[in-house]
Image (cartoon, helix red, strand yellow):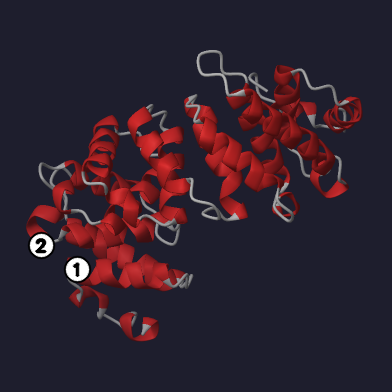
């Protein structure tokens, strides 16, 4: 199909909807056929024409689902163009456009916001209000919720109502895969939103057999930072029971951190995250701190620190 599509002049016959559907299909299947995706992008830009203010949506018959499909393709990284991402965001902001979005369309929008870190406040506000208002979260799967969390955290969208709704959706036992634990904790910690039930459940889930063994260096450091920040909130301090689980988790994270595959993979931010986390909670792990110091003193490592680290 890709070869047929790339035959001379064939892509020129694609409509906007044809571009959207084909891009989504190949991206959804995870097939990294770059010549095809590049060709589809060129046709998309060709259809856009020179009117960048209006884009191609008004004149080319793209539906809400078409925009959602294109957004998903761009978010996967198989298609990438700053102008197109900006147009996707602009189209989504037009009056009434989001009102017909399905649960899947909302999840796709969250994925785009997450991957491309689009900081359009109006888009985020509309997205958040729509999600809560229509009770669409009931149809979200794990990936959808985590992408929404990351989108909110990365653009610093402090929306306690949305975050509370997401927490309620995530609390049922066994909802998370190990892959999402670090990102979920990081998102809530970044926004400074403490949900005692969710924090305790996250800590317990992370302590389950096999969870930490699947963590890489960045996951371990991110988790240590996140739980330290959540456990040290002054305005909404967790219960003693939740704090106990946090301290137990931090002790277990220290053991994982000392394993050579983790230590050797720590970057400057990981070292800073970890050191800050244990210092903030007052947890003394002398062996861990010594190994972090050794890592920091390796040739050229200090030069990779930024001012904040």
Q: Position of residue 17 (x, y in %)?
A: 19, 68
Asked whether, in this view, residue 218 is left or right of residue 180, the answer is: right
Q: Position of residue 247 (x, y in %)?
A: 73, 29
Residue at 90% from the left image edge and 25% from the top image edge: 286
Q: Quadrant of the N terminus?
A: bottom left
Q: Residue under label 2, please give it.
A: 61
Q: Quadrant of the C terminus?
A: top right
Q: How many marks?
A: 2
User: Looking at the image, is 29 positioned above or below residue 48?
Assistant: below
Please say whether residue 203 is visible from this viewpoint. yes
Query: In this orientation, which residue lies closer to the viewer: 21 or 179?
Result: 179
Residue at 28% from the left image edge and 50% from the top image edge: 136
Q: Position of residue 149 (x, y in %)?
A: 44, 41
- Marks 2 and 1, the one that precedes in the sequence: 1
> Crowdedness of circle 2 by 10 Å Cα count: few (<14), some, many (20+)?
few
Residue at 30% from the left image edge and 34% from the top image edge: 120
Instruction: Give residue 158's mark.
Output: none
Residue at 50% from the left image edge and 32% from the top image edge: 188
Please say whether residue 51 is visible from this viewpoint. no
User: Looking at the image, is 61 positioned above or below residue 194?
Assistant: below
Label 2 – label 1 distance at C-alpha: 8 Å
Instruction: Give residue 17's mark.
Output: 1
Query: In this orientation, which residue lies closer to the viewer: 171 or 68?
Result: 171
């Amino acid at each position: 199909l890709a070869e047929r599509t790339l035959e001379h002049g064939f892509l020129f016959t694609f409509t906007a909807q044809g571009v959207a559907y084909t891009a989504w299909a190949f991206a959804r299947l995870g097939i990294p056929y770059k010549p095809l995706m590049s060709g589809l992008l060129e046709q998309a830009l060709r259809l856009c024409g020179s009117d960048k203010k209006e884009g191609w949506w008004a004149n080319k018959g793209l539906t809400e689902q078409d925009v959602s499909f294109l957004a998903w393709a761009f978010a996967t990284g198989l298609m990438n163009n700053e102008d197109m991402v900006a147009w996707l965001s602009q189209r989504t902001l037009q009056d009434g456009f989001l009102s017909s979005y399905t649960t899947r369309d909302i999840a796709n929008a969250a994925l785009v916001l997450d991957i491309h870190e689009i900081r359009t406040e109006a888009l985020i506000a509309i997205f958040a209000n729509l999600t809560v208002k229509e009770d669409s979260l009931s149809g979200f799967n794990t990936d959808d919720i985590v992408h929404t969390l990351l989108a909110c955290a990365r653009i610093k969208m402090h929306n306690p109502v949305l975050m509370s709704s997401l927490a309620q959706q995530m609390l049922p036992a066994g909802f998370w895969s190990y892959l999402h634990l670090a990102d979920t904790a990081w998102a809530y910690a970044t926004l400074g939103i403490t949900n005692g039930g969710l924090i305790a459940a996250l800590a317990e889930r992370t302590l389950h057999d096999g969870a930490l063994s699947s963590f890489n260096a960045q996951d371990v450091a991110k988790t240590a930072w996140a739980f330290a920040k959540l456990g040290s909130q002054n305005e909404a301090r967790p219960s003693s029971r939740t704090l106990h689980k946090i301290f137990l988790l931090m002790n277990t994270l220290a053991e994982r951190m000392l394993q050579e595959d983790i230590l050797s993979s720590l970057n400057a931010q990981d070292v800073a995250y970890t050191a800050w986390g244990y210092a903030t909670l007052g947890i003394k792990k002398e062996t861990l701190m010594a190994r972090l110091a050794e890592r920091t003193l390796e040739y050229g490592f200090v030069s990779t620190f930024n001012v904040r680290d």
